[in-house]
Image (cartoon, rainbow, N blue to C red):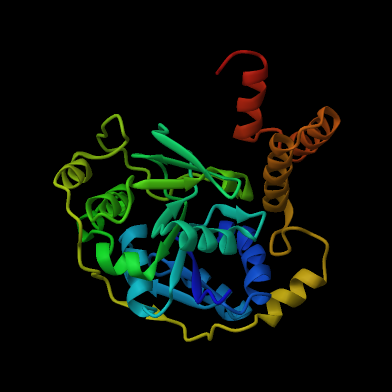
Amino acid sequence: MSANALICITSCNRLNMVRRILPHYFAFANSNQDFNLLLSLDGNNERYLKFCAEYRIPLLWSDQREGVGLSKNRVISQFPNYNYYFFIDDDVELVKPDVFTSMIELSQKCNYHHMSITPLKKVYKEEVVDGIIIQKGYYGGGYFNFYTRQGLDKVGGWHTAFAALKRFGHTEHTFRYLHSGLSDFPFIVPSSFISYMLLHDPPHVTTESLPSNPNELIAEEQAMIDGKQAYFQVKTLSPYHYNDVPFEYNSLIESLLSSTKSRYPLLQGKEKFCALSDFYFYMHITKNGFFQKFAYFSLAFFLNPLSPRIKHSVKQMMGLVK
C-alpha cells in the first residue's frame, strides 16, 4: 500500500514525554518508507532544538506558543503534499504500530476523511467493518487523530481564535466534517484501536481553568459549532521554522534501539521507572489471565507506587470510586 503519510507528534514544554515515546514511532517509520515522522513544537525551546539536532529529528517550531491547533496549521502549511496526516499528542505511546496502515485501509474502505482514537462521551451509533468496531458520536478527545488531505482541503485548518488561549478548537474543527457533509457524525472512532495506544496523561501544559459547558467546551467554541461553520482557511500567526533535517531512515535512533533491550532507551532514573510503571499498568488492564494481571500490577506498583492510575485502581477495588 502506497500511503504517503506524515506522522506528526505535537508537543509543548514536555521534552521528557517526547524522549519517552519517540523511539517507538521511529521504529515504525524506519521500517515503512511511506511514512515520515515529524516533531512539531508549539513555541521556542532550546532544549528541543538541541535534542533534535543530536538525534537528527525533523522539527518544526514557532516563535510563540499558540496551542496545538495552530501547531497543526503550521505542519499542513509547511508540508502540504501528503495524502494522510496523523496528529498525535506527546503523551501517547505507540504499542501496536499497525494502527497506521489499518486506519488508512479503513479510511479507503469507508471513505472516512477524519477519525480519532478516543473514548466518546456518548456512543450514538456503532457498526463493525472487517471485525473493527466503529463508534460514532458528537464529543470526544483529541490525542490521536487521522486526516486525509482531501478532507483538510474541504474543511480547512484549526481556527485562529483559540491561539490566544493556547488550547481548545479541536472539537469545532471535527464538527466541520459533519457540517461539510463529509461524515454523518463529527467523531468517528475505531474503538478496536484504543488498546493500540498507551496514554501517559501527564499534567496539562496550559492549566488555566475556563468556564465550560457539559461537553467541556468554552462558550466561544460551542457558538462556532452551533453556527455550523464548514470551512476556515488554514492560517498561521507566529513565525515558524523548520530545522531542515530530511525525512529519512534515522540510523541514530535505530542504533539506540538495537543496542539495548530497554523499552525507554532515552530515559534514566525516576523518569524511566515512571514510564515502565505506566507500561506495566497498561499490560495489567489489557491482559485477561488473573496471574498475568496480578504480576503486571505488582511490577507497576513496585516501580511507582504513587502513580495516580494505581491509586485510582486501588480505590476502585476497595469500592471507594466507580
Would residue 156 be seen by someone viewing this image from the given angle? Answer: no
Taking the spot 41% from the left edge, 59% from the top edge, the residue there is 111
Quadrant of the image containing the N terminus = bottom right
Tell me which corner region of the image, top left, top right, bottom left or bottom right, holds residue 40: bottom left
Residue farthest to the top, as pictured: 319
* Residue toward you, 313 or 47: 313
Q: In this view, does 191 lie above or below 20?
A: above
- Left or right: residue 96 versus residue 10 is right
Q: Which residue is drawn at 66% across and 33% down?
A: 306
Task: Please tell me which residue is depicted at 33% across the width and 64% down the height of the picture.
Answer: 151
The one of 46 and 190 positioned closer to us in this rendering: 190
Q: In this view, does 197 lie to the left or right of 109?
A: right
249 shown above or below 291 = below
In the image, taking residue 311 as reference, residue 41 lies left or right, namely left
Identify which residue, 245 or 138, lies in the foreground: 138
Q: Position of residue 97 (x, y in %)?
A: 65, 60
Q: Position of residue 70 (x, y in %)?
A: 31, 63
